[in-house]
Image (spheres, coloured by chain):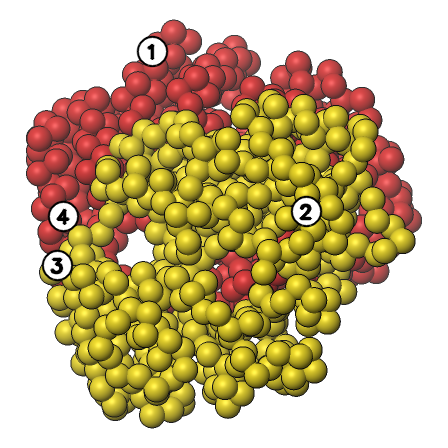
Amino acid sequence: MASQVTNSGPITVEIIDRLREIVGADGILFDPDELLVYECDGYVVEKKTPDTVVFPTTTEQVAEIVKVCNEFDVPFVPRGAGTSLAGGCLPVGGGIMVTLTRMKRILEVNLRDRYAIVEPGLVNVHLTQHLKETGFHYAPDPSSQGACTIGGNVATNSGGPHTLKYGVTVNHILGLEVVLPDGSITQIGGPIEESPGYDLAGLFVGSEGTFGICTKIIVRLTRNPTAYRTMLGIFESVTDATQAISEIIGAGIIPAALEMMDQGIIEAIEAAFGFGFPLDAGAVLLIEVDGLEVSVDAEADAIHKICKAAGAREVQAANSPEERQLLWKSRKQAFGAIGRLSPSYCTQDGVVPRTKLPEILESITATGIKHNIRIVNVFHAGDGNIHPILLFDERDQDQIDRVLKASDEILEKCIELGGSVTGEHGIGVEKINFMDKLFTQSDLDVMGLVRTVFNPTGNCSPQKMLPTAGACGMEHIKKSHPGRQAAM
Amino acid sequence: MSPTAIEASEEFQPATPAELSRFLAENSAGAQKPVYPVGGRTALNYGHLPSQNGIAVSLAGLSKQIDYPNRDMTITLEAGMRVETLNKILKDQNQRLPIDIAQAHRATIGGAIATNASGPHRYFHGTLRDYVIGIEAVTADGTVFHAGGRVVKNVAGYDLCKLMVGSLGTLGIITSVTLKVRPCTETTSLIWATYDNFSEVDAVLENLLVSEARPVFLEVFNGKAAHQIIGESRINLPEDKPVLCLGIEGTEAEVGWQVKQLKREISSIGPDELTVLENDDATKLTSTIQEYQTSSDDPISFQANLLPSHTMDFVQLATEFHVAVQSHAGNGIVLGHLPDDASTPEQAEALLAPLREKATSGQGNLTVLNCEDHLKDQLFHYEDSTPEWNLMKRLKTQLDPHNILNPGRLFPVKADSAT
């Protein structure tokens, strides 16, 4: 049984030598100073440095690394660009971090059969850039797409603004090559759209690194829309804006994207990008419809009318491709602008039924006031996927405590409204204590059985996704805060 | 053609998931009889045929609507609901589940999910894996479990919804599901174009990949299938030649523009004749195409899964063998019915072997869908020796260690290790 419960034993010279033999001297880090970069991902509340970081360049190297980890009973965790906002890359209990950023080739693009085969370390946007002149793109577009890797997207089943119409990562994955936690290499699914048997690729996507390490990804390519209309709806209040969202979806219109930004975030974005957002607006909606030239105007008109009826002060159209680009840049890099508001932030990722958006936003405001934490909002409104951003200074423990309390209350409210605690960021270590609030013990037991098939020892990404790792006596974890898990 | 083992089994019809759970728990702790989940009994001969009598668990008593917040565009319902009933509930709110499920008056939504039913519209709308966002099921030992939820975006926990779609009732009995639904479309048109040969059709398909229009399906029929479809639909259309049939849906303006555009695009590689169907004719022909696979009485049918670029080549070969062929050409899926005279295993295999060889040589696969029970053992097998199938077997063993649920359906039961 793996020793994921406590810190792994010291990484011996022998282990390091063996790993170095596999990846070469420039493919391994073990100096504490160098390891510091890997102590956390986009979720900065919890930190733990891995004992060693390796950078494989081939599937075979990944398999060999995994075998060495098993031989010495050392836990291992895969990592892409480390943009997880839920601590998905945190090496709980230490061990070996397998960083896949050097496996970033595009191995095949087959337009006729509408797929591409890529390595996991490929940065998301690089695939779409590569396809630029082809009339096709890779649809999932997380806001971090300029940095995050497609392997990481597979692990967390990432979303993004345009997933409202086009679906999340799993809807675009045809097959995977994976190194299972026992070190064997298996292909699941493939470029052929359908095969008899279980949909293992569908199951693997979103397993947060607990089923193994994917080393090749076969993605579906999507035809580019021929026309866009991008609009900015300006509202006096968040309530009016959420009402408009509810009316748009209720009217059976599915925009390509429907994003909300409140006053707090507008202020930061405006300071950073100077788009010309109105600073006195309560909220703005960034709405995009796409499709055929013949249909986008009618859809845009319908949305315009709904926004006005819901009390929009104004609905502006992006008049040029440049203006559209800048609008999207402002939205997608909103998180980068937050530095203007506070030294640290923590983003939540709850989901509610779309008609409950007004209710959850009121609750978020009240929670912020109650705990004296400033909260700003920028999120995928059309999906009901909220991203309240809690601002704090991580040097102040009291603030951290209040942020954690406020986060918990917001997520509990999402559950109460019939939603979920994560729409696209994953459970990671951050939300592991919510699993038994969302799911019954039986649900978790069945999920545990499924994990055992892939990861019987629990050595691969220990302490992720399920409150108990399907292994030895970690029950007390459920009651303690994740803050202490990382250090264990 | 119903498999005799299931027909001969006694039936149990639970009224609640709890009752089903108790029943399965008792069975698992006691007699461990084989359990065959049944919905509308429209797909009982999928996969390997079960050989042992057991208990047929009918979901007919679990057919209620649970929650339909239509403005959220999701619906939660019990798995035994007929697809026709679901379609009607949705239509009343101008919404739909855009999945082609044949025999909707009999088929249940649970059965459709367990068999991963799909049809022409998968080209544009995807398959059930893209629509099932929440699931409740009961494992062989009576454990009731859930996965997903009732919101359209959710990554909490493992996505067991994906695991259950297409699992042929071998991992758990689905008791309820939450589906994402879509708005209804205003209008539909079809283009029916005949060609001299399949290489012309292939060239047209390649052009359509970069079409300015967005057809919702790209169906190809050979002359034999086209003849049968026209016979069923009683619409007067050119037949006995390769047919490319395009589906177009949307608002009046979108459909009108696309029909014009597509006519222009596909005319660049000479169709023989080209007919546009609108309104009732379009609806009627669409429905005939959706039902075609179940309306044919040819004895042996198969499905081949291929790369789209290899599909017309395969269709050509099948046509030479007098197979009636329907192809979801944009998805690389070919459904074929062998001719009547291929009625012995030897005759059938003489056709199937070269077709299977053709499919596998291009990374594809071929499986027999329907045939007489006594032929199944000889004609049917999954290519189940890969590491991927090994993982599937381990999943089955982990979730159903006594092999109670649909034993033999996906993984053949060895005579000596029968439960």
Residues packed near mark 4 inside 10 Å, few (<14), some (14 to 19) or many (20 plus):
many
Mark 3 touches mark 1? (CB < 8 Å): no
Say which chain tag 3 marks: B
Callouts 3 and 1 on one subunit: no
Is disc 4 placed on a helix, strand or loop?
helix
Say which chain tag 2 marks: B
As shown in the figure, which amino acid type bears the numbered disc 1?
Ala
Q: Is residue B331 left or right of residue B382?
A: left
2 vs 3, front mark: 2
2 vs 1, front mark: 2
Q: Chain B: what color?
A: yellow
Mark 4 touches mark 2? (CB < 8 Å): no
As shown in the figure, which amino acid type bears the numbered disc 2?
Ala
Q: Earlier in the sequence, mark 2 or mark 3?
A: 2
Q: For residue A359, what is the image quadrant? A: top left
Residue at the spot x=57%, y=83% of the render?
Answer: B341
The residue tagged 3 is B252
The circle drawn on residue A366 is: 1
The residue tagged 2 is B8
Image quarter hosting the N terminus of chain B: bottom right
1 vs 4, front mark: 4
Is disc 2 placed on a helix, strand or loop?
loop
As shown in the figure, which amino acid type bears the numbered disc 3?
Glu
